[in-house]
Amino acid sequence: MACIRKRRGKWVVDYRDAAGIRRWATFETRRAAEIFLAAKLEESRQPIQPVVDPDITVARYADHWLSLIASSVKIRTLSGYQQTLRLHVLPALGTVKVRQLAEGRVKALLAAKLASGLSKHSVRIVLAVARGMLSSAVDDQVILANPADRLGRQFRLAQRAADRQEEIKALTREQLTVFLRAAAETFPRFAVLFLLMARTGLRLGEALALQWGDINFHDREIRVVRGFSAGRLETPKSNHGRSVDLSQQVVRTLLRLQIERKTQKVKLGWSDLPPWVFCSGAGTPLDASKVDKVFKRVLMAAGFPLHFSPHCLRHTFASLLLQQQESPAYVQRQLGHASIQLTVDTYGKWLPMGNKAAVDRLDDQSGSKMVATRGFEELGVVEVPEYDGAGGGS
């Protein structure tokens, strides 16, 4: 029952909203509280008009949800959602009405997937897709609460940062040198692409979508404003552009490539210089699958295992910067991560864990000596012993 009561000189309205959740509102006067309560009571008497059929099944609602998000997610992401629903969610829950989908049914689905041998990573994706769809159903007022909300912890599906870091494969500085040398010797057309990715942290799709107009040679930076995803040209993964610094070596290499492109224009009879920095003999962007094949052949030439991929060059870039004690905030901006927390969670194992020189730099030479001297004087010591770094006194 809704009511008004006085508490600590204020008038408190105690009521339940349309979803049945208990709420409170505080007012200075009883009259204001009464007006508010009358409005809430009137709202509660209005029938709720769901956006979709209250008896809609999971299968039909999945189609509705996919149509809602189609314009706001990447094509590859949407395709992944469709595949997860088709292979895992709908066979088990498709005929169930959404409003009858209790937490127990979702738990049974996840348990069955784990028992079938599906990896925890794959089950984590199944839960994420189901949770996203059912969250939309809450917004559409088909259900009051999301039955998949708290299941990640119950099934221990939440991935720890340490586990995620162990999955990352990055080349060492020495391995990168060997790899780039092998690329220059075996596939010189692709060597510049691999160098750029290793020195900037660009994703493969971003590097293949790079155009000459995106490069500012004078200020040594590039503007990342597009990327290829599943063969389509889209915005970068973060949905916004970013500026990335270029090393002197990369600038010199790109300038040489630009000169070579002008020579190719005459040799191959191009009417115009292709806008793409990395292009085929026909002047079209390089195909990602072709780059993957070349990358593996370079790995073999370098004598490295084939579990590395072009994306490992992005990880290599981040790990090498952090190992030389560059700011994680700088690495975040270069990579285009949404938050520094994502950068630290992903690459934390490469962060230096101790640096005594850092605390030494906090010392003020004159001030610290004065404090230390006074401390010894209080103990009756006239001369302050010098620290010799050996850990013992004189």
Image (cartoon, rainbow, N blue to C red):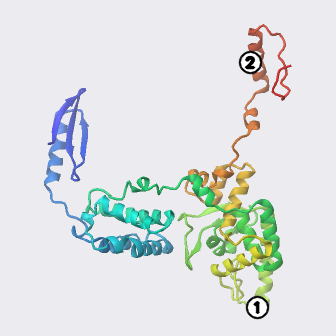
The residue lying toward the viewer, choosing from 81 and 206, is 81
State left or right for residue 108 relative to residue 100: right
Category of crowding for the residue at label 1, using alpha-carbon neighbours closer than 10 angstroms: few (below 14), some (14–19), many (at least 20): few
Which corner quadrant of the image does residue 386 belong to?
Answer: top right
Name which of mark 2 and mark 1 comes first in the sequence.
1
Q: Please name the residue shown 65% across and 65% down the image.
A: 223
| Left or right of residue 152, residue 280 in this image | right
Q: Residue most toward the bottom?
A: 269
Which residue lies under the disc numbered 1? 268
Q: Residue furthest top?
A: 380
**Element at badge 1?**
helix
* Label disc, if present, on residue 371 of the rendered structure: 2
Q: In this view, does 166 lie above or below 311?
A: above
Quarter of the image where one finds residue 64:
bottom left
Judge by depth and name the residue closer to the eye, 320 or 156.
Answer: 156
Name the residue located 74 percent from the left edge and 14 percent from the top edge.
375
Residue 268 location in percent, x, y?
A: 76, 91
In the rendered image, residue 154, in percent from the top left (x then y), is placed at 41, 53
Q: Quadrant of residue 206?
A: bottom right
User: Which quarter of the image is occupied by the N terminus?
Assistant: top left
User: Amino acid type of disc 2?
Assistant: Val
